[in-house]
Image (spheres, grey):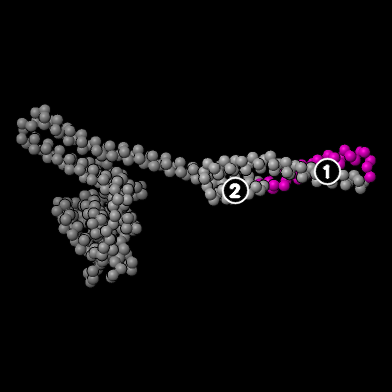
Amino acid sequence: MRKIPPLSLPGYFALATGLIYALISFFFHFELIYWALSVFLVVIITFLVSYFGIRKVIYAQIENINEEIIGSIQNTVFKNKMQSRSAEALEKLSTYVKRLIQEKTIEIDNLKELERMRKEFLGDVAHELRSPIFNVQGYIHTLMEGAMEDEEVRTRFLSKAAKHVDHLGILVEDLVTISRIEAGEIKLELEDFNIKELIREVFDLLDHSARQKSINLVVRYPQDHELLVYADLQKIRQVLINLVNNSIKYGKDNGATTINLLETQNEVTIEVADNGEGIAEKHLPRIFERFYRVDKARVRSEPSTGLGLAIVKHFVEAHKQKIWVTSREGIGSIFSFTLERSKGE
């Protein structure tokens, strides 16, 4: 919107009045000098009267609006700026109101997004809890209705019910972990440790799962020295367990899970790679979201809480480090994250 200088309105009004007076008085045959002087005085008087009149009536109202806004929002900085009773009050008020509208619009959009995420989260939690509960309920009711007498059926149903109960326990534990992380209740216990030894421990822990699918566990790192990092040992152990376990779970039979360690002066990059099915590019931006499923059909055959990668991302970012994924369908995926190197190396 084009700005109008504060003196424009009184000036235009005074000139218009002077012009009308000049045309009318011209017919009374005043001497030229008196006629010109009278026109000049009319213009000056009209300008002064209109200027102070507009200032008193309009800007006084603007100052009242300013005071009401100031009083309602208790903004000291804005109050100091708006105390002057100048003709710029309208422009200042307009600028502030526009900024206030923008801030409130952003705030409202953020609240709407939080509400959407809350509803989505509650829906996901309800769905994840409902599946194992209904399955356990079905097995128990079937046994109560007569299948208990058949020992083979009884053993099979109780075994399946136990698996669903275990899955339910893991889900609840992951939900508690996510809640504690987001509430800031989980603190890091930073220490120096050898990342090579931790990788060997994780491989030993998951060796049985890998053998069941004939997956080779491979690690590539420099052999000539220790590789110390400064991080929370237990949190990074959980990160590696989750990433390697996912690699085994969703990898191809007779495939491989490989961990590569890449060094720079200040950090170490850990890559967990597999030669599995890979992940479509459209899924990559959301892969670390809670309960996000790349392939829901595959999840039914490979049970998962859907919270593992979200927890992994929280743990890595709590160290002020980065985590990302690259993948190509039919070739495999690489999950990478960084850790700070020990300052004592």
Q: Is residue 313 left or right of residue 74?
A: left
State whether residue 121 is above or below residue 254.
Answer: above
Instruction: Look at the image and give the residue range highlighted in magenta.
Output: 3-31
Near mark 1 (Cα within 10 A), the count class, few <14, some 14-19 or many ≥20, is: some
Q: From the image, tell me which residue sits under label 2.
A: 82
The answer to if 25 sits in the magenta stretch is yes
Q: Residue 12, located in which quarter of the rendered image? A: top right
Secondary structure of residue under mark 2: loop
State whether residue 103 is above or below residue 151.
Answer: below
Q: Is residue 186 left or right of residue 71?
A: left
Near mark 2 (Cα within 10 A), the count class, few <14, some 14-19 or many ≥20, is: some
The answer to if 57 sits in the magenta stretch is no
Q: Residue at x 26, y 45 (%)?
A: 176
Q: Earlier in the sequence, mark 1 or mark 2?
A: 1
Q: Confirm or deny contact between disc 1 and disc 2 (CB under 8 A).
A: no
State whether residue 144 is above or below residue 212.
Answer: above
Q: From the image, tell me which residue sits under label 1.
A: 42
Three-letter amino acid code at the position of disc 1:
Val
Q: Where in the figure is residue 63, as x and y percent of width and height?
A: 62, 43
Q: Residue at x 40, y 42 (%)?
A: 113
Residue 307 or residue 21, whichever sits in front: 21
User: Rounded to the nearest whole Å, what is the CA distance between mark 1 and mark 2?
Assistant: 35 Å
Q: Where in the figure is residue 276, as x and y percent of width and height?
A: 25, 52
Residue 268 can be seen in this image: no
Residue 284 or residue 60, whichever sits in front: 60
Q: Main secondary structure of the magenta part?
A: helix
Q: Which disc is residue 62 wearing? A: none
